[in-house]
Amino acid sequence: MVKMTKTDQGDLADAIRVGARRGPQCFGAYFDDHGGSCALGAAYDGMYLIPREHGVVIPKHLERLFRCLDEVVKTCPVGCKKRLPLAAMIVHLNDDHQWSREQIADWLANGANGPAS
Ligand SMILES: [Zn+2]
């Protein structure tokens, strides 16, 4: 298992916060037609500051931005026992638990730990 540095997670959290300021949150897709983004879409947006007026962009290789996204497996912090790669976990928290993007950014910044025992 690859050890993710705090900086990686912190950078990812910062990207989500930047992207989250650019539009409303959406669920079930990285981006919607109304300028919305899910937490992972927001991270991509925050990194690249995509010109949204050019239409909806579907990032296919976000994991290249942050190696940690597909190399680090996380346990769901909500306690549903899911274990997923970080990218899938971010989408899971966004879509299934409907965490706000800021909540997800805070979780990442604080170490992306599983449920408190
Ligand atoms: Zn869960």
Image (cartoon, rainbow, N blue to C red):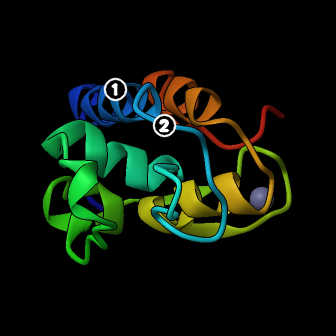
N-term-proximal mark, 1 vs 2: 1
Nearer the observer, 79 or 88: 88
Q: Residue at (50%, 64%) from the top-left corner? A: 33
Q: Quadrant of the C terminus?
A: top right
Which quarter of the picture shows residue 80? Answer: bottom right
Which dot marks residue 23?
2
Q: Quadrant of the N terminus?
A: bottom left
**Cβ of mark 1 under 8 A from ligand 1:** no
Q: Amino acid at mark 2?
A: Gly
The local crowd at label 2, few if under 14, some if 14 to 19, many if 20 or more residues have their Cα within 10 Å, is some
The answer to whether one can see residue 3 in this image is no
Q: 109 above or below 82?
A: above
User: Which is more foreground, mark 1 or mark 2?
Assistant: 2
Q: 6 above or below 19?
A: above
Q: Which residue is mark 1?
A: 18
Which quarter of the picture shows residue 76? Answer: bottom right
